Image (tube, rainbow, N blue to C red):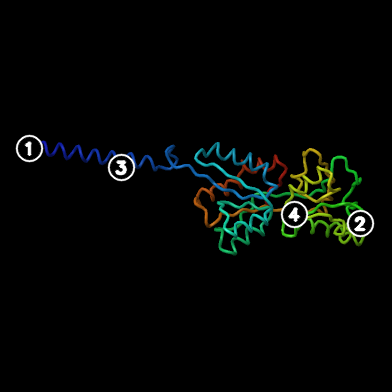
């Protein structure tokens, strides 16, 4: 009888141990509702602010364990902040140059992932007091152009556009120099350019199409397709990310059909 009771007790103990391991296994199973939630810190170009609100909401709807904290600024400013130690899981830039700098510095992993494109337009206040009819008017004496800082991606794209316009039929030979002479301020990012124009504190500015379309107080002047400059948006996962797998999964999702459709609805073009 003593032996039998010992066996029964041992069997019960083994069953209890097995139950503990089974419960632990369920708690850590992928996709389990009891898994720890993941919060991704996204540093993104100012021109992505509006579309990212929709994109991240759509991602969370199908990945309820993931939430987002999004901060936006010029891509150059964000790249500098990350170099200086600002926390981030994913960096989404309005170009591929800034993410590549982080890769070259050993601060990002993988490669640069292109996920969207954009085009340029001339933004003017809705009342258009300077009567800007074509981009050629940007070189007219007295026109006040609002630009961005030298390191901001829109400035690189705008410089290329101005050079292209100077080669268009009917544009003056000194178009680029006259345009440069008309720049009256350098803002931190594209959103700041648009905001200043909406307040009537300038006559025109070269911005992304998505930043000027449908904005109160802003009208746009089309740029010739032959001169326009495509912008490529690229992203990277930061090496210091606390959730690198989740960050990589989100960045990969941005290149998929659902995200592409939302970027297209917001006026972006497909990534090259």
- Mark 4 and mark 3: Cα distance apart in space: 56 Å
Q: Secondary structure at mark 3?
A: helix
Q: Which residue is mark 1?
A: 2
What residue appears at the point 52 percent right and 44 percent down from the top-left corner? 39
Q: Which residue is mark 4?
A: 154
- Mark 1 and mark 2: Cα distance apart in space: 105 Å
Q: Are marks 2 and 4 in contact (CB under 8 Å)?
A: no
What residue appears at the point 35 percent right and 42 percent down from the top-left corner? 25
Q: Nearer the viewer, residue 10 or 115?
A: 10
Q: Residue furthest left?
A: 1
Q: Residues within 10 Å of mark 4 (few under 14, many from 20)?
A: many
From the image, state whether disc 4 or disc 3 is nearer to you. 4
Q: Which mark is residue 171?
A: 2
Choose the circle earlier in sequence order: 4 or 3.
3
Residue 159 at what x, y percent from top left?
79, 59
**Quarter in which the N terminus is drawn:** top left
From the image, state whether disc 1 or disc 2 is nearer to you. 1
């Amino acid at each position: 009888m003593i032996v039998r009771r010992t066996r029964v007790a041992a069997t019960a103990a083994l069953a209890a141990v097995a139950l503990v391991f089974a419960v632990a296994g369920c708690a850590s199973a992928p996709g389990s509702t009891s898994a720890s939630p993941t919060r991704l810190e996204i540093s993104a170009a100012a021109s992505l602010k509006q579309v990212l609100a929709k994109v991240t909401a759509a991602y969370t709807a199908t990945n309820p364990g993931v939430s987002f904290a999004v901060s936006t600024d010029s891509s150059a400013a964000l790249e500098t902040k990350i170099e200086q130690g600002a926390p981030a899981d994913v960096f989404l830039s309005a170009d591929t140059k800034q993410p590549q700098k982080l890769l070259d510095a050993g601060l990002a992993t993988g490669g640069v992932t292109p996920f969207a494109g954009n085009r340029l337009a001339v933004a003017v206040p809705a009342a258009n007091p300077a009567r800007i009819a074509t981009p050629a008017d940007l070189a007219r004496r007295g026109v006040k152009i609002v630009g961005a800082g030298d390191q901001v991606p829109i400035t690189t794209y705008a410089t290329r556009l101005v050079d292209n316009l100077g080669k268009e039929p009917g544009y003056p030979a000194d178009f680029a120099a006259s345009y440069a002479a008309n720049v009256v301020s350098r803002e931190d990012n594209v959103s700041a350019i648009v905001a200043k124009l909406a307040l009537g504190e300038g006559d025109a500015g070269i911005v992304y199409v998505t930043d000027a379309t449908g904005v109160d107080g802003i009208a746009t002047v089309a740029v010739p397709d032959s001169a326009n400059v495509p912008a490529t948006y690229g992203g990277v996962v930061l090496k210091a990310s606390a959730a690198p797998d989740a960050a990589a999964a989100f960045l990969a999702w941005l290149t998929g059909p659902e995200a592409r459709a939302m970027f297209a609805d917001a006026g972006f073009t497909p990534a090259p």
